[in-house]
Amino acid sequence: MPKTAIILGASGATGGEVLQLLLNDDRYGKVKLFNRSSINIQHPKIEENIINIFELDKHADYFTADEVYCCIGTTKAKTPDKETYYKIDYGIPAAAAKLAKANGIGTFILVSAIGANKNSSIFYVRIKGEVEETVINEHIANTHILQPSLIVAQRKDNRVMEKVMIGLFALLNPLLFGGAAKYKSIKASQIAKAMVWLANNRYEKLIVTSDKIAELAAK
């Protein structure tokens, strides 16, 4: 029987890549999107739910699926207000994990970030660590947390510093090996491929860093 997947963050770089993979994958019959505005893609598999994404818990009856792909995230430049940032980077994934557990969804895959640490004094790093802990504590059977380093993608918005960093990492990547390999930049398309692979295969690691993401994407 074809599976149903939920994607949070389908309008973003990684979420958009996941969406395209699932639309072209015969194992999936329906892809549910929960967005604050339409992504304007017409496809028979897509069920788009336009909601206040900060009130995800009010839509529990529709939050049913086999898998959840949580690709929600923002940046300091895009969301300078820390309260709003927290609602996006912590509040949405935390609510999604709670709903997934309550509704018996067996797979939850979260995109976090390298260096996430709930005890960090750096706000943005601490939030990632806190949401990882919250997701893990829901004890969803097949949970994986991806910790990519710099994500390489085509962006709709103009991120000057990100473009500079992507160029820098293109030079640094070949020099990063062994324990430093997890700091290599990674393409959004590779993250998406790894997420779909993890949803459909057994994998022993809970935390998946950039080097391992690249390995899984190549399978």
Image (spheres, rainbow, N blue to C red):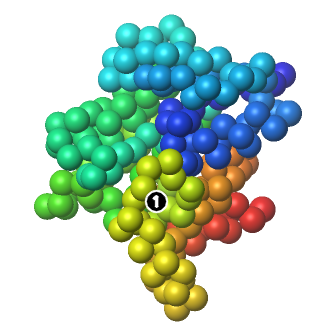
Q: Which residue, given by chain and number where applicable, does mark 1 sit on?
A: 147
In the rendered structure, the answer to whether residue 64 lies left or right of residue 37 reads right
The answer to whether residue 50 of the structure is visible from this angle is: yes
Question: In the image, what residue occupies the spot 51% across and 43% down?
Answer: 12
**169 or 97: nearer the eye?**
169
State the image coordinates of residue 164 (x, y, percent, origin top left): 41, 74
Q: Inspect the image, locate mark 1, and give the three-letter code of the amino acid beneath it.
A: Gln
Q: Which residue is the extreme one toward the bottom?
A: 175
State the image coordinates of residue 31 (x, y, percent, origin top left): 67, 26
The answer to whether residue 181 of the structure is visible from this angle is: no
Name the quarter where the C terminus is drawn: bottom right
Name the quarter where the N terminus is drawn: top right
Question: In the image, what residue occupies the spot 46% across and 12% down?
Answer: 60
Work out whether 209 lies above or below 69.
below
In the rendered structure, the answer to whether residue 100 lies left or right of residue 194 reads left
How many numbered circles does the render carry? 1
State the image coordinates of residue 85 (x, y, percent, origin top left): 25, 41
Work out whether 24 lies above or below 182.
above
Indicate the secondary structure of the residue bearing disc 1. strand
